[in-house]
Image: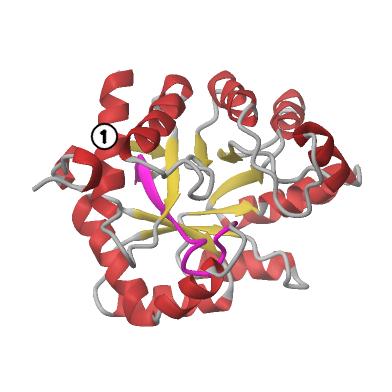
Amino acid sequence: MTLSGGVAPAPAADMPRVRIGKHEFSRLMVGGNPVSGNSHQPGTLDRQMRDYFSAEKVKQLLGACEQAGINTWQSRGDRHIMRLLNEYRLEGGKIQWVAQTASELGDIPRHIRECASMGAAGVYHHGTSTDKFWAERKMDEVRGRLKAIRDTGVLAGLGTHIPEVIDFAESNNWDVDFYMTSIYNLSRSREEASRLAGRQIDGEFFWEPDRAEMLKRVKQTRKPCLLFKVYGAGRRCGSASDMRAAMRQVFDYAKPSDCVVVGMFPKDKEQVRENCALLIEAARGAA
């Protein structure tokens, strides 16, 4: 069997794993954005994802991930996701869960406790929310929420799209188990993004030089990192060779303790085993 673009599938046993705290995670985690209808693309893709991902389709995706060697789902910690996860587990699914705080909820400490009670292996502070507090110079609020995560006994993580946030947390010796690191900075103001692009930017701005800046932080910190936006929310998926190059660049910097998070939308093509094969190939090449 050969996947699209000549990518050869790999046995599930070949998926490398890392240990963070008491948990063993597959180095490839499946991301939750497609399930939540969040494509980070203009047009109708958000709607297509919402239409596709019935409860049954979500469970099929998680089952395919477990069969391929992916043992962890990273997703929002909202009640919709919790219900889907509970249903999947009631039917025998074993996938681990790393939960993102749902910033729209009013009582975040209570929400964190709910995620922990659902058996989350770890909870991390939502990167967009972190970046908002960073812009407002209110990082003590973030630190307080991280303490609320720590108090539940699960792994505590800090999400961000901004490399300087990692610098700040590291220089202040923040008590976190991992960083959730976007390799594109999606938290720039419209004015800054437009200046860098040399044109008017009205939506999200994916700027290729961002990749190296965040990857340098990933390499510098001793803390494990969960790297996401590896393919630029589909912008680096035009061909198998582009996907391979994007994954290999990540593993030029990734530490042996780091994982990669990839959202998958297998409506039109198989994506689970393809991404497993690409990660395994890149990890072996970096070894």
* Residue at 28% over, 71% down: 60
Which residue is label 1 attached to? 280
| Nearer to me, 255 or 3 | 3
- Check disc 1 and give the amino acid type: Ile
List x then y, in percent, for residue 265: 39, 62
| Nearer to me, 44 or 105 | 44
Residue 248 seen in the current view: yes
Q: Quadrant of residue 78?
A: bottom right
Residue 139 seen in the current view: no
| Nearer to me, 101 or 64 | 64
Q: Secondary structure at mark 1?
A: helix
* Residue at 32% over, 80% down: 56
Q: Quadrant of the C terminus?
A: top left
Q: Horizontally, is 58 left or right of 3 in the view?
A: right
Q: Does 30 appear in magenta? A: yes
Q: Is residue 64 above or below residue 173?
A: below
Q: Does 248 appear in magenta? A: no
List x then y, in percent, for residue 46: 55, 69
List x then y, in percent, for residue 237: 42, 44
Q: Quadrant of residue 149?
A: bottom right
Q: Is residue 113 above or below residue 280?
A: below
List x then y, in percent, for residue 80: 53, 78
| Nearer to me, 286 or 111 | 286
Q: Is residue 2 above or below residue 145?
A: above
How does the figure colour the protein chain or chains? secondary structure
- Bounds of the magenta segment: 24-40
* Residue at 27% over, 44% down: 276
* Residue at 21% over, 52% down: 68
